[in-house]
Image: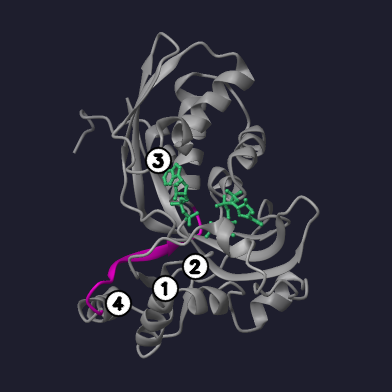
Amino acid sequence: MIVLPAPAKLNLFLYITGRRNDGYHNLQTLFQFLDHGDSLSFEPAADGHLLLEPALPGVEQEHNLVIKAARLLQSKTGCTKGARIRLTKRLPMGGGLGGGSSDAATTLVALNRLWQLGLSQEQLARLGRRLGADVPVFVRGQAAFAEGVGDILTPAHPPEPWYLVLNPGIEVATAAVFTDPELHRASPALSLAQRLSLPWENDCEPLVKKRHPEVAKLLGWLLEYAPSRMTGTGACIFATFDSREAAENALARAPEGSTGFIAKGCNISPLFTALRQLDEPAPSSNTAT
Ligand SMILES: C[C@@](CO)(OP(=O)(O)O)[C@H](O)COP(=O)(O)OP(=O)(O)OC[C@H]1O[C@@H](n2ccc(N)nc2=O)[C@H](O)[C@@H]1O
Ligand SMILES: Nc1ncnc2c1ncn2[C@@H]1O[C@H](COP(=O)(O)OP(=O)(O)O)[C@@H](O)[C@H]1O
């Protein structure tokens, strides 16, 4: 059995530079991982059966991105093995933290190992793209400046501060934001260096604040403590702090109805830190003292 994390991501900035013919949008966004997220355990099964427990409320098993990722891997490789998968869900759904995409990426990476398929990271990222625009960055596991629909990745090395992430307790559907006629879709496409040097903003934020006053209210509150923004298409918001203690002080005062957590920004995904630990030989017990 292997147990692996499926970390959250933040979009440290997010600009929409245009709408494509396929309905998707071209973005410029900066992805960073958090040392907080879901967790999955995988046990191989000799027959091709896939079992995922527990089911997520409101998500049919066959629509769960974990099952979709496992089935995609089976069908692309002809693998006849199965797996028993347990998902410990900690990330809010529709929160802009990429939980579903991260679960899918961890499943691709874990089953590639467990089933000894030998697919490269490049092949897994390409498969992941079919499951969602956000899946490739989780498969790659390196903080990145993303362009295209979010899948053309340039490694990036932003600071790794403490974050307070707050959830206003609502779910925002990504598709609803991207189909809204009032979404600002005309940001200029700039170089990474230019983007890094300008203030970091999120083009979805004004629209989501307008459609969901809960987000506007919570953001107004958090801005009193530190520079704050929305991640992805919301609903979660985040602020940067110099220390864990400062973030905890703000969380302790968070308005009623909101929930939140504190996490450290990571430019290397905790998934890959965990995989490295699996590969390290266990320390020998008979070393001389
Ligand atoms: C925009 C981001 C930023 O991280 O939002 P969040 O979902 O994380 O909030 C993501 O790239 C989302 O990625 P993901 O959630 O995997 O999106 P998908 O399942 O591929 O697409 C959901 C819907 O969003 C729209 N969509 C998504 C990505 C994109 N670049 N342009 C789009 O127009 C499409 O209409 C699509 O039907
Ligand atoms: N394993 C999964 N975890 C979360 N959501 C999932 C999963 N599988 C399918 N979904 C669907 O994907 C939607 C978006 O999920 P999520 O990735 O958590 O949000 P976001 O893209 O805003 O970060 C959910 O509302 C749910 O219907």
Q: Does residue 143 appear in the picture of this structure?
A: no
Q: Amino acid at mark 4?
A: Ala
Distance from Cα at disc 2 to Cα at disc 4: 17 Å
The disc placed on residue 247 is 4
Residue at the disc numbered 2: 231
Q: CA distance from mark 2 to mark 3?
A: 23 Å
Q: Secondary structure at mark 1?
A: strand
Task: Provide residue 263's location: percent of width, then percent of height.
Answer: 34, 64
Q: Magenta segment range?
A: 255-268
Q: Position of residue 6 (x, y in %)?
A: 41, 45
- Distance between mark 3 and mark 1 Cα atoms: 26 Å
Residue type for callout 3: Val
Indicate the position of residue 236 as horizontal and vertical percent values: 41, 67
Asked if the beta carbon under badge 2 is closer than 8 A to the nearest atom of ligand 1, the reply is yes
Residue 109: image location, x then y, percent:
50, 34
Tag shown at residue 238: 1
State the residue lying farthest toward the bottom.
224
Task: Mark 1 and mark 2 in contact? Answer it, CB < 8 Å.
Answer: yes
Decide if residue 278 is in sight here: yes
Name which of mark 2 and mark 3 comes first in the sequence.
3
Q: Secondary structure at mark 4?
A: helix
**Quadrant housing the N terminus:** top left
Of the two numbered discs 4 and 3 in the rendering, the one whose residue sits closer to the viewer: 3
Does 80 sit left or right of 281 as displayed? right
Neighbour tally class for label 1: few under 14, some 14-19, many 20 plus, Cα within 10 Å: many
Give the residue pinned by disc 3: 59
Q: Is residue 239 left or right of residue 255?
A: right
Q: Secondary structure at mark 3?
A: loop
Depth order, front residue of 255/42: 255
Identified by mark 1, the residue type is: Phe
- Dot placed on the residue nearer the N-terminal end, 1 or 2: 2
